[in-house]
Amino acid sequence: MNEMTRASGFKADTSTWPADHPDVKYRRIGVLLLNLGTPDGTSYWPMRRYLHEFLSDRRVIEVPRWIWWPLLNLVILTTRPSRKGKDYETIWNKERDEGPLKTITRNQASALAERLGSHPEIIVDWAMRYANPSTESRLNYLQEQGCEKILLLPLYPQYAAATSATACDQAFRALMKMRWQPAVRVAPRYHDDPAYIGAIARSIERHLAGLDFKPEKLIATFHGMPQAYLDKGDPYHCQCQKTSRLVRERLGYPKDDWLTTFQSRFGNDPWLQPYTDHTVERLAKEGVRKLTLVAPGFSADCLETLEELEGENREIFEHNGGEKFSYVPALNDSDLGNDVIEAIVRRELMGWI
């Protein structure tokens, strides 16, 4: 069972119920944190199951099925699971035998439940879009606990169809199976929320204060997406650019020393540019010797930050002449990160509590 946390002590008023009335849990409010997901293990078959679910999502891959299905099942899923499994192994939480994204999201839910402790009617839980704990299982649990109202919080600051929308799609699929559906709210994107911008800026300030060098350039890097998705109207690119600008302005950072890039491309089609790895390589070759990266689009550190940014891009920078490199950790389950989640949840629960 998923490790959920909730405020305790809430009891419905049953004084007017007849003696033979069955026990019914009601009048509770659920808050469900939603994140992308992580494989159940790093070996071939857990990785294959995870990648199959992820790469079969029509929100993620918009290529026609007749083209994508044979490529996915006959090529990608025969080679990629083993390779990605080795990457996950480098960041795996050995103590809990799980990916760091799962550990961090659980901690975020626990912290939120504690902060909302004055509202015993609220139950806080968490789920993943892909793999476990599944969104459907946690929504069913919240309903069984008497949650007549549920707030969904996709932990993606910037909205994208391949992240925020697919998380909601999965929740709505579960709701379609329920005879008695709870009332549902979805927290909107928070790419320009003052609490979020302030937290990112403070995390950068704290990180820079702890370095033994001053970076010559600072890169705000976001997860990429195919250029075609932007052309179709996805707002993600614009929201990333706004986040980057607001954080830079909040810090008062020199415009010429701040760059915005996109990482984690997949396949041969053009993705949002400039690419992070190409930019890191170019800067090093141009003589930049001190560099810092921050990833404001990630609410929790995961493979794309720990292995790709902290690992691969550090190697690219140093291999091409760079000397000092650092990565600013995601907000994760820090006080700054938990402040952001609490602020959003309290705002979106207004009228319910």
Image (cartoon, helix red, strand yellow):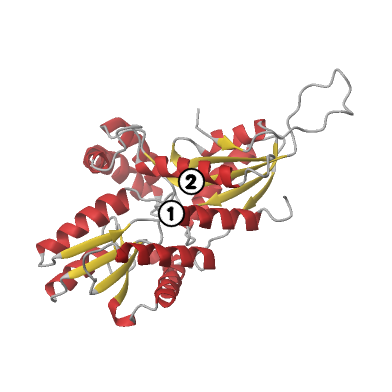
Give SS at disc 1.
Answer: loop
Foreground of the two, 280 or 54: 280
Instruction: Please say if 304 is above or below 213.
Output: above
Whether residue 146 is situated above or below residue 240 in the rendered picture: above
x, y percent for residue 150: 65, 45
Q: Which residue is mark 1?
A: 299
- Where does label 2 land, which residue? 108
Q: Nearer the viewer, residue 91 or 53?
A: 91
SS of the residue under disc 2? helix
Counting from the top left corner in percent of width and height, residue 323 is at 13, 65
Relative side of 194 to 148, left or right = left
Report whether 37 appears left or right of 89: right
Q: Determine contact: label 1, label 2, CB under 8 Å.
A: yes
Q: Decide if residue 286 is on the left or right side of residue 207.
A: left
Asked if residue 161 lies left or right of residue 320, the reply is right
Residue lying at 26% horizontally and 32% vertically, measured from the top left: 43
What percent of the width, then of the height, locates residue 103? 40, 40
Q: Nearer the viewer, residue 49 or 212?
A: 212
